[in-house]
Image (cartoon, grey):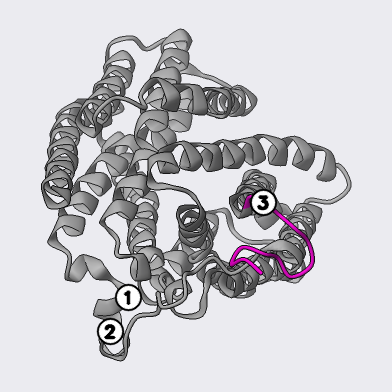
């Protein structure tokens, strides 16, 4: 029996299960997140001023847990981690359906975040386990497309479900992920190579072993520039709804349609763009992504019109499509085989920091002056893109010299 034979069924491409799970995760988030504030206010009787804090609990659970358990798939295997993660998140969403008040909702969201902290890095690790390195960027692009597709399908179904009850979106999100967990139990093999387990010395290192950023200088530099670029880029998502509503008078529905347009662009353009840049160097890709993001900031800074918002969303989406699949592929190339999940967890921590620090800094700048985030964002993106591009280029040259 081959190492990729399945418990009950024959399945030639285990990474497809990762794509399905990525879709279900995006679907569940898209189903829940847009309607969470309405549920909190009208069903759970939570004060409006505390709704943002609850979102912070969701992201905070991921951010707290990822450094400690994000690499656990390197120790107990990919399959059990993905099954437990999908099950925990699914049950968490269902528990949210029954939660009332701030305290209950906050605890449930923290628990959901803890289980979700290992979901995405382990899916990336699964894909890296079963595909050649030359295909990683393309495979990660497919995973992103699946997530975007789920992010489109979720709100569309949610708009129908909330007609009966706002809380039903949590039940539907939970059931979707529990179905994913059952699919994994039936079909997913263990993809970790025999002998990939860290040795006893590494297991005793605790936190430092789980967060290789403390020991791998190349990874630390790479993640620093990734975080800086990600934080500045996240200002578009965080501030654009406020900018569109306050400065241009757009309705909430129009803002939602604007972001749906961006998700559609990512869904249908990601794989094509990745193929277009497949022969380009990482330096070229990152600098192109940085320039495109700078153009988005420039349009928002110089042209306060609705058409400018559409153009800015297009530029922002292009930038994300360029650099999105590149980073997990680059981090995976740095990772020893036995620590793939741990290195992916480090990248996941950066993503969580971006989602926490980005909106906080962006909205603070916007509160001072609506044009300030775009003015500051241009030089910050230029520096971050240049630093990240040079770091990726140096890493590539070092890899070539080592192989020679």
User: Does any portion of residue 92 appear in the rendered image?
Assistant: yes
| Along the line of sight, the residue nearer the viewer: 9 or 144 | 9
User: Does any portion of residue 247 appear in the rendered image?
Assistant: no
Sequence-wise first label, 2 or 3? 3
For the point 78% across and 39% down, the residue is: 157
Say which mark, if any, is on residue 226: none
Percent coordinates x, y for residue 224 in the rendering: 20, 51
For the point 32% across and 14% down, the residue is: 299
Q: Which residues are magenta?
A: 1-13
Determine whether the residue tagged by mark 3 lies in a helix, strand or loop.
loop
Percent coordinates x, y for residue 211 in the rendering: 28, 71
Please identify the quadrant where the N terminus is shown: bottom right
Badge 1 is on which residue?
A: 210
Badge 3 is on which residue?
A: 12
Look at the numbered discs 1 and 3 and tell me whether their residues touch, using CB distance below 8 Å: no
Q: Is residue 246 above or below residue 303?
A: below
Percent coordinates x, y for residue 380 in the rendering: 17, 35
Determine whether the residue tagged by mark 1 lies in a helix, strand or loop.
helix
Percent coordinates x, y for residue 257 in the rendering: 61, 24
Q: Is residue 151 above or below residue 283?
A: below
For the point 27% across and 28% down, the residue is: 285
CA gap, disc 2 to disc 3?
34 Å
Magenta-drawn stretch contains 260: no
Q: Is residue 126 left or right of residue 164?
A: left
Magenta-drawn stretch contains 2: yes
Badge 2 is on which residue?
A: 202
Mark 1 or mark 3, which is nearer to you? 3
Alpha-carbon neighbours of circle 1 within 10 Å: few (<14), some, or many (≥20)? many
Which of the 4 image quarters holds residue 302?
Answer: top left
Sequence-wise first label, 1 or 3? 3
| Along the line of sight, the residue nearer the viewer: 153 or 121 | 121
């Amino acid at each position: 029996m081959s190492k990729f034979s399945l418990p009950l069924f024959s399945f030639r491409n285990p990474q497809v299960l990762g794509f399905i799970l990525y879709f279900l995760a995006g679907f569940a988030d898209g189903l829940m997140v847009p309607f969470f504030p309405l549920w909190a206010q009208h069903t759970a009787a939570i004060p409006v001023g505390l709704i943002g804090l609850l979102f912070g609990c969701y992201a905070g659970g991921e951010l707290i847990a990822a450094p400690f358990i994000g690499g656990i798939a390197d120790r107990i295997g990919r399959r059990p981690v993905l099954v437990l993660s999908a099950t925990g998140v699914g049950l968490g969403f269902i528990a949210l359906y029954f939660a009332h008040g701030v305290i209950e909702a906050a605890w449930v969201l923290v628990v959901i975040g803890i289980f979700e902290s290992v979901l995405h890095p382990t899916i990336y690790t699964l894909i890296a386990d079963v595909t050649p390195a030359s295909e990683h960027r393309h495979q990660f692009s497919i995973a992103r497309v699946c997530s975007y597709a789920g992010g489109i399908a979720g709100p569309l179904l949610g708009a129908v479900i909330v007609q009966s009850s706002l809380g039903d979106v949590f039940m539907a999100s939970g059931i979707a992920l529990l179905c994913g967990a059952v699919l994994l139990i039936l079909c997913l093999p263990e993809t970790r190579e025999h002998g990939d387990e860290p040795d006893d010395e590494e297991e005793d290192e605790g936190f430092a072993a789980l967060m290789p950023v403390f020991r791998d200088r190349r990874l630390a530099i790479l993640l620093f520039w990734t975080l800086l670029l990600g934080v500045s880029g996240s200002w578009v998502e965080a501030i654009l709804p406020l900018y569109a509503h306050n400065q241009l008078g757009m309705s909430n529905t129009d803002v939602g349609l604007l972001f749906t347009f961006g998700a559609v662009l990512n869904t249908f353009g990601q794989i094509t763009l990745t193929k277009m840049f497949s022969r380009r160097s990482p330096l070229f890709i990152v600098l192109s992504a940085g320039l495109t993001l700078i153009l988005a900031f420039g349009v928002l800074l110089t042209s306060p019109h609705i058409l400018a918002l559409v153009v800015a969303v297009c530029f922002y989406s292009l930038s994300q499509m360029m650099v999105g699949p590149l980073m997990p592929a680059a981090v995976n190339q740095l990772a020893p085989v036995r620590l793939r999940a741990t290195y992916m967890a480090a990248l996941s921590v950066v993503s969580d920091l971006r989602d926490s620090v980005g909106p906080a800094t962006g909205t603070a700048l916007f509160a001072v002056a609506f044009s300030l985030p775009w003015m500051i964002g241009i030089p910050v993106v230029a520096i971050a893109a240049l630093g990240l591009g040079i770091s990726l280029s140096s890493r590539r040259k070092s890899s070539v010299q080592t192989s020679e």
